[in-house]
Each structure stands twice: as C-alpha cells, then as structure tokens.
C-alpha cells in the first residue's frame, strides 16, 4: 500500500454530540501516532459523501469516518470499487458495521488501527442503480421502528435507542404483504418483517442475520411471518443471540439478488438510513469496498 494519507471526517452530531466533544482528544491521539492526517467536520449527511469524494481526488488513500453507521454509509457511497480504504472511529449509537468487522469502540484502539490495521475487502449491496449499503436493510416492522428511532435518537442512548421504539411500534403495527424474487426462491405473503443482511447484526447487536458474512458474495434474507403481540414480546429477546432462527415463523435464505414488490409502497431502511420504497432491486457487489480492520 502507498504511504498513508488519512482524511478523517468527523460527524459532530454522532452519538448525541460525541463527535464534537471528543474532537480535541481524537486530534491528540492521531498526532501521537505521527501519521499525516487532516480532520474535517461534516455539515450534513450529504456533505459526508462530498468530503469522501473530494478526499480521493486530493490523494487521500484512507478515509476515516468518525461517527456511526449512518456516517460510514454516507462515505462509502463515494468509495464503491475505489482503491481508497474506509476506516472507522465508532462514535454512533449502533456501530454495528465496525463491530461486525472486529473494530473496538474505544477511541484508543480505533485510532491505533489507523497505524497498524489490515486492509480487508468486503461486499456491498447495490440498491437499485445508485445506492449502496454495507450492513443490514429491512422492510416491514423494523423499518417502521427505524422511523421512530430516528425521531427519538437525540433523547435516548444505548440499547434504549432501539428497544423503546420497538415496544412503541408493537402497539400499532399491521402485517404487510410483499413478494420477493430471490436467486432460487419466490416468496409471497404477509410479513412481520424481512431483513437483508450483509453482516450479522443491526440495532446495536441484534443478530437478525446471524449466519451472514461480509465477504461471501451472498446476501442473507430473514423472512419473519406475522406474530401476535404477546408472541412478539417473547420472540424479540432471541434476536440478540440469533436463536430466532429456530422459531417456526422464521425463514432464512441466501441469495445474490433480490427483487421486491408490494401493492402498497413499503420503506426500505439500510445502515439505519431510509433508502427507497418498494419496488426495489438488491444485488451483491462482491468485495467492492476496502476497509481497515484489526
């Protein structure tokens, strides 16, 4: 690899303002490692993508997102198939992508990776023609939970960011009808939700697609049939361990493509961000993103 030239994009609002608060300490730790770097605050989600694109034209070969999964999601939109490497300083509420890649959440360890980390290539999921996700996407119940979580995230922290919205949504959720065309299977019917996983977890550790690997060239699909409210309350804790795969309501598939249709438009959320509505197409792009890992 060429000599390291690092651009660090800091989301000042990540983790309830942790990005702004930790800025002096982050700068100090990077200076200690004597690696050429440039720190810059992002001004919006779109600005993250712009900064990542500009960094590559300016010759930076490692682009580090200091924030959460949403910040990384915005940066990788400008890095698909490039030689630049995506690094992480996890400061968000979820941090599922770096956690699945073995990246510690403490600042000291994350900064040390910038000097001694290894480059790994992982898959990305192309959404329609011009969007990409690296983690987990979903339609149905979990997408509607995401809407509530994004509205409440400034008031909550830790697992409460996901658990409280989930409990609220169980009071009003109605099953949705969806049709999916996979590589070998055609699925149609009512769902509680469907998750599409390039990695194992989302929502800060919920192992919704526990068999997923980020570099196997496949997308894991977890289809969950509608369940009654009481059953859902009992069902939910098993997702943290991946034991939900043993439940009769759960159906698990692997595929390289997905075509999703529904009579009523449904939201697709991926990496914690709204991506599009049905109908949509998903396609695995094998090993199309370089990331810095232990």
Image (cartoon, rainbow, N blue to C red):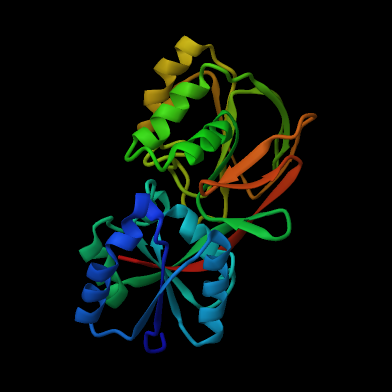
Find residue 80 and report its horizontal and vertical position in percent. 59, 68
- Residue at the image position 55 percent from the left and 15 percent from the top: 227
Q: What quarter of the picture does the N terminus occupy? A: bottom left
Height in image: 37 above or below 207? below
- Residue at the image position 40 percent from the left and 49 percent from the top: 96
Q: What quarter of the picture does the C terminus occupy? A: bottom left
- Residue 99: tell me if it is visible: no
- Residue 133: tell me if it is visible: yes
Height in image: 55 above or below 238? below
Apparent side of residue 268 relative to residue 42 in the rendered image (left or right): right
Find residue 123 and report its horizontal and vertical position in percent. 54, 59
Apparent side of residue 55 relative to residue 269 in the rendered image (left or right): left
Q: Image quarter for residue 61?
A: bottom left
- Residue at the image position 35 percent from the left and 82 percent from the top: 37
Apparent side of residue 166 relative to residue 36 in the rendered image (left or right): right
Find residue 151 and report its horizontal and vertical position in percent. 50, 38
How many numbered discs, if any? Answer: 0
Height in image: 54 above or below 260? below
- Residue at the image position 24 percent from the left and 57 percent from the top: 106
Q: Image quarter for residue 187?
A: top right
Find residue 124 and report its horizontal and vertical position in percent. 57, 58
Q: Image quarter for residue 85?
A: bottom left
């Amino acid at each position: 690899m060429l000599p390291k030239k690092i651009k660090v994009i800091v989301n000042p609002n990540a983790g309830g303002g942790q990005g702004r608060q930790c800025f002096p300490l982050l700068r100090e730790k990077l200076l200690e490692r004597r690696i050429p770097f440039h720190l810059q605050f992002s001004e919006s989600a779109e600005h993250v993508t712009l900064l990542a694109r500009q960094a590559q034209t300016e010759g930076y070969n490692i682009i580090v997102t200091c924030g959460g999964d949403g910040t990384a999601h915005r940066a990788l939109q400008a890095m698909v198939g490039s030689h630049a490497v995506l690094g992480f300083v996890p400061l968000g509420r979820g941090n599922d992508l770096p956690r699945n890649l073995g990246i510690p959440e403490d600042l000291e360890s994350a900064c040390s990776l910038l000097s001694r980390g290894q480059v790994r290539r992982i898959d990305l999921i192309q959404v329609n023609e011009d969007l990409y996700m690296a983690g987990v996407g979903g339609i149905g119940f979990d997408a509607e939970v995401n809407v509530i979580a994004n509205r409440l995230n400034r008031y909550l922290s830790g697992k409460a960011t996901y658990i409280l919205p989930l409990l609220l949504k169980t009071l009003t959720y109605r099953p949705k009808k969806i049709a999916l065309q996979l590589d070998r299977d055609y699925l149609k019917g009512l769902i509680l939700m469907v998750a599409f996983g390039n990695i194992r977890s989302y929502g800060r550790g919920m192992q919704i697609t526990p068999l997923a690997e980020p570099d196997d060239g496949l997308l894991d699909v977890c289809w969950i049939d509608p369940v009654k409210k009481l059953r859902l309350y009992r069902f939910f804790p098993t997702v943290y361990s991946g034991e939900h795969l043993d439940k009769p309501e759960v159906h698990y598939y692997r595929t390289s493509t997905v075509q999703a249709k529904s009579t009523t438009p449904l939201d697709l959320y991926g990496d914690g961000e709204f991506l599009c509505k049905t109908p949509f197409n998903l396609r695995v792009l094998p090993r199309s993103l370089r990331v810095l890992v232990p």
